[in-house]
Amino acid sequence: MFVFSIFMMMLLANNPAPGTLVDVGGFKLHAQVMGSGEPTVVLLAGAGNWSSYWALVQPALAKHTRVVSYDSQGTGWSDFGPADRGLNQDAYELAQLLKGLKIDGPLILVGHSLGGLVAHTFAVRYPERVRGVVFVDSSTPDLHLNFRDGDTFKWDLYRNKAKGKPLPPIQEKRLSPQNVTETKSDRDPGDLSMFSAEVQGHFRAIFARSRKDVLKQKDWVADELAEMHAHPEQFKLGSLPVRVMSGDAKDRYSENMPERVLWHEQATAYLMGLSTKSHLISVKKSGHNIHLDEPELVVNTVLSLFRELSPAK
């Protein structure tokens, strides 16, 4: 145990936060900023992921404009934020991060998985900021509604986790440190060969850390999803340019999981219906992690939107 602790401290010391730490209200979020120009592209990682997961996409996009990837609260190099959590709080904290980075111009949001839901929420809350959205196999308000519970046939309605209470107001500050528990990490980062040696070091440093969890954290995402599902007209994006990237590899789901296939098809249809200017990109060689399997396609999709918004003079 002592040897492991020494190894972990050395690993972290050799791999400090690669980007910038920004105070967003009594706690700090970590962001990596590359390139220059507008609109600024903001990359939003999926649940439990962080900025490093965009390492195959961000440098290529940064050749054309400014690109920001960041770690949401409690992930990567970011601190934990206020205890009451949800999509609205995440969107607010992203807005504060951009303010701290002095980025006040137009944005293109690129959201993977749960990050797509945060991007959607941000676009609804701050429509004056957003010029376009790219959903990278994004989650939708029906998240888990049609999923099995593990490998059994028991239906697990995520909406049942809703508290049935009014959504809490945005918490502008974390008033006190979170009560955090730590457990030894035994996570395997998996195959990192696709990344540079530097990025591999970042992954190993994060995976080597003890896992931290906040006690008594209140998750309001189920309630927010229920609201989005019940009042879809309030969450439409009008004529905002949208790209929907769908991971459609044939072996994405096993043959005995037809409800997952149906959910994926419904999710894609939902995302396509958010805007009158939606375009579908069906990715036949990838499942959920398109930005890792087909990073060039993600880059080209974002650039097609970028060029649409910034036509040559």
Image: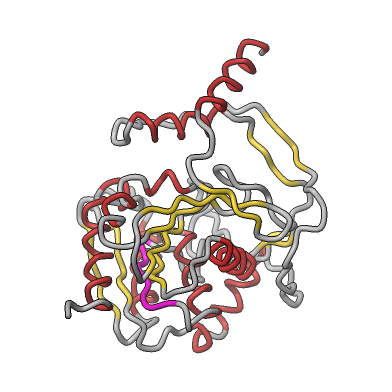
Relative image position of residue 34 (x, y in whole percent)? 38, 53
Relative image position of residue 173 (x, y in whole percent)? 75, 62
Residue at figure coordinates x 57%, y 46% from the top left: 75
Picture layout, residue 293 above or below residue 164: above
Which residue is nearer to you in this view: 212 or 252?
Answer: 212
Which residue is nearer to you in this view: 141 or 29?
Answer: 29
Q: How many marks?
A: 0
The reply to whether residue 255 is in sight is no
Picture layout, residue 138 above or below residue 19: below
The reply to whether residue 306 is in sight is yes
Relative image position of residue 123 (x, y in whole percent)? 48, 76
Outermost residue on the left side: it is 313
User: Is 136 colored magenta in this rendering?
Assistant: yes
Which residue range is magenta in the image? 130-137
The quarter in which the N terminus is drawn is: top right
Residue at figure coordinates x 26%, y 50% from the top left: 295
